[in-house]
Amino acid sequence: MTFRQARWDEPDVWDLAPPPAGEAPPEVPGIPDRMRRKEAVRWPELGELEVVRHYTRLSQMNFGIDTVPYALGSCTMKYNPKVSELLARRPGAADLHPYQPEATAQGALEVIWRLEKILARVTGLSEVSLQPGAGAHGEWAALLMVRAYFRDRGELDQRTEVLLPDTAHGTNPASAMMAGFSTREIPSKEGCVDLAALRGAVSDKTACFMLTNPNTAGLFESDILEIAEIVHGAGGTLYYDGANLNAILGVTHPGRMGFDVAHLNLHKTFATPHGGGGPGAGVLAAGEKLGPYLPVPRVVKSGRKFRFDYDRPKSIGKIKTAYGNFGLDLRAFVFALTHGEEGLNHVSRRAVLNSNYLGLKMGKYLPRPFRTLVKHEFLLSGVPLKAKGVRTLDLAKRLLDEGVHAPTVYFPSLVEEALMIELPETESKRELDGYIAAFERAVTDSPENLHAAPRNLAVGRIDEVLAAREPRLSWKDLRAHPAKVETPGSVRPAP
Amino acid sequence: MPRWIPNEPGEEAALLEALGISSVEQLFTDVPKKARIGRLGVGPGHEEREVVRAVDQILERNKPLSRFANFLGGRISSRYSPAAVDAIVSRSEFYTSYTPYQPEASQGMLRVLFEFQSLWVELTGLDVANASLYDGATATGEAVLFCRRIHEGRRFLIPASLPWEEKSVLLNYASGPQLEVQEVPYDDRTGRLDLEAVRKAVASGDVFGMLADVPNGFGHIDEGVAELKGILGTIPLVVSADPLSLSVLEAPGRYGADVVVGEGQGFGVSPSFGGPLLGLFACREENVRAAPGRIVGASHDLDGRRAYALTLQTREQHIRRSRATSNICTNQSLIALAFVVYATTVGPRGLADLQRSLAEKARTLASALGGIDGLQAPRFDAPYLGEFTVELGRGTAAEFLDRLRRRKVLGGHALADPRPGSPPAPERLLVAPSDAIGAKEIEKYARAARAAIEAVGRSA
């Protein structure tokens, strides 16, 4: 299959109808002069068709799950069911204000309550809040809960350290820093937590150990029960990063593994759309120890009525406006209702089957670090390509030319020239074989072609160093610093 | 089993065969038996048709805003959005895409985000914007941490009138690095910031930043905000601004704001019971490397064609880990798309006209409520645009709003912190006529308000 992405020479929106400078804004009575805008907002005035055409053209220069397989490891790019989009746009879901009286939003409260109950089952942790805006937001909030817990125990001054493995997602150490902890990395052994190193690192300073299981090497941390024992033995808490939950639905759960608190990403496991980087939807789940510290309000059921409960004296308070991303919670609820017990179990079995199959086939072309029994994702190393002068980055760009999205690259950092690959359960064997064939063509192509990739996309290889060295971050910057070499182009004849 | 998991006859068998195993369970031997679970207990799955029916039945227990005369506001709006906006947002090339880690394959979304950044720069009068944060409240929290990175000190000043939710979120952001948050009181008649208190706080030292909001937590426009930078000097000023108001109000960058944050949901997406929302963030060029979140920059490809990519990533968690400026990984790209498509469809004149018309509705409402004995509307003697605060002379805001609701009026929302144990607060509500409100609905509100306050008087 030959792939060609649309290549519109579409002008930027301000070049379609350059807005004049110095226009006076409309008068609004009563505004004090000091606060009145002196010059009207400079933004183009376009007809609706022009607007629609502009953004439709831009959409055609963008990969999405609906057009290509998206093999980004740890991102769990599964199909976003259309029925969820339909239901989230119903007036009974979309046309609701978070401050309208509880009596007029019983259905919304019920969706939240029921989804929380389902997620409590899925995580094995009894207390759930849907307030976080995304996974990292949940990580940070969970660590604030850990802080509050140790403050109540009078141990906050002492427990200042968050431990994490060197395979951890970058958000983990960043969240720990934002929550006021210092971080300490535990080296891995064969891709998993080195128990001896962990034993040596825990102390009465340990507040929390943050772990993803399966981890970012796609390996299940089989020593998880010992890990929990070590952390709890030192008086610390155990945090579950749920980014990789898609591998373990109905197999195990954070509660059974000994975790005290977890975040989930509904935009991964529960198939809510990623929207070009967001919105996401985060979940916080906690056991008895940390449950009282969850954000308010919680949704409770009294008799047949649902209501918000703010009476949680130990709660950390609010972490976001309103109650979380309800529009996405509803989509996740649809996903859970549709799958049910059998379906959710099947999700992980098929995701892991896909991953092991891909690993087996793609492992013929590049080495696989660590053991080959993997969960939802696996790693390859692009090191052998270096002999030909080819980097993992070149391979990623060449894959794009095949009309498939590249894997996550250069992560985790413990594997040199890493590729992290995940095609979840919604991809058929045919699509997997197509991906493998595309990978074979790419990895066996000549160094010249690999260096010249991509050629079939809206633009060729981008100079990302220039973007960072001489930042141009808005149309004002473009006007102030027009680059000589650029040809923005236009589909319209010059006036 | 949902169709979403492919299940062609023989498909799984072929995958298993390739792996040389007979059962998928053989792929889970690395999960120790003691860690295995039995059933989840989440009930059986359902066909799509059944799920639609079940979910619709639940949603029927909601009463959408359109069934009421709606005066709910705050940072979240239910104003009409042209159908073209959702049509673009519904393009699955956009909504099923991921963070543009491979920029060559994602020029569409990158260009949208660049346009979005440009628009927020234009509205705020600042130099650079990021590609969005979760919501206005978290953007304000991130702004506090940002100020601390660019200025020394331990104390951050906020208006005492800041809505309790935003205050709570902000306190959480400040709690990690153990920053002190000090409330600046307001004048009881006008609701305006006490500038003398700001002067005193600054003079006592150790202040690393200050937040002011436009409109403020009471819905009013405080011209004192334009004088703050003169008092703060080099201390960073954060202004939290309603984007629609900026169509007619001065760009905060022009009166010295170093950061402008805001809630952008009202541009193109429905309220959806409070999410997804859109956090807006802009700052000055010299501080961009301290900014949180994703940022899109312009560059070119090897043939010299203009191209866009995520940039300045050395600030970010996936590179810098515990030394990152923020833990942000997810932004709100799709809502940022709605924001820029909404603004471009409506156009700058359309935005200003809308703001003017909402301000007229608010003034009409204020005069309709002004003569009612037992409530003060507006409570504060200060200019306003589309919303203002009402204070009740008797009864509680909750009771008042409940009585209005029974007459099909959503009369605003109570401003007091609902958490038990919160300090006692006056019975105030924020009232914001939506764009669907006309003279008839305003009369309805006034009638319902009069009846409600009289009923409270009788029972008292």
Image: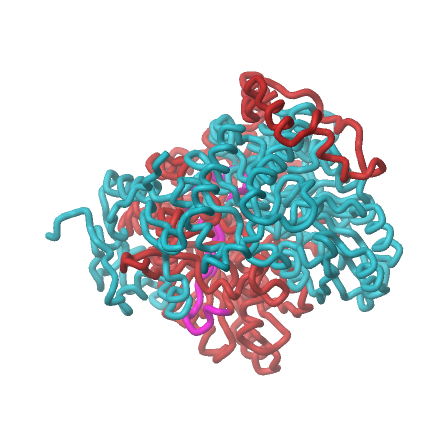
Chain colours: A cyan, B red
Position of B167 with respect to B381 (left or right) is right
Residue A21 is situated, as x and y percent measured from the top left of the image, at 22, 63
Left or right: A473 in relation to B19: left
Which residue is painted at 60% across and 40% down in the image? A359
Residue A176 position by quadrant: bottom right
Q: Is residue A239 left or right of residue B204?
A: right
Q: Relative to residue A307, is residue A133 depicted above or below? A: below
Q: Residue at x 73, y 29 (%)?
A: B25
Instruction: Please tell me in which quadrant of the rendered image residue B28 appears.
Output: top right
Q: Position of residue A302 (x, y in %)?
A: 74, 30
The magenta stretch is: B261-289
Q: Nearer the viewer, residue A243 or B121?
A: A243
* Magenta stretch: includes residue A303: no
Residue at the farthest left position: A495
Q: Nearer the viewer, residue B183 or A422?
A: A422
With A61 as the anchor, is B280 left or right in this view?
right
Q: Is residue B118 visible?
A: yes
Q: Position of residue A261 (x, y in %)?
A: 75, 47
Judge whether residue A296 can be spotted in this image: no
Is B273 included in the stretch rendered in magenta?
Answer: yes
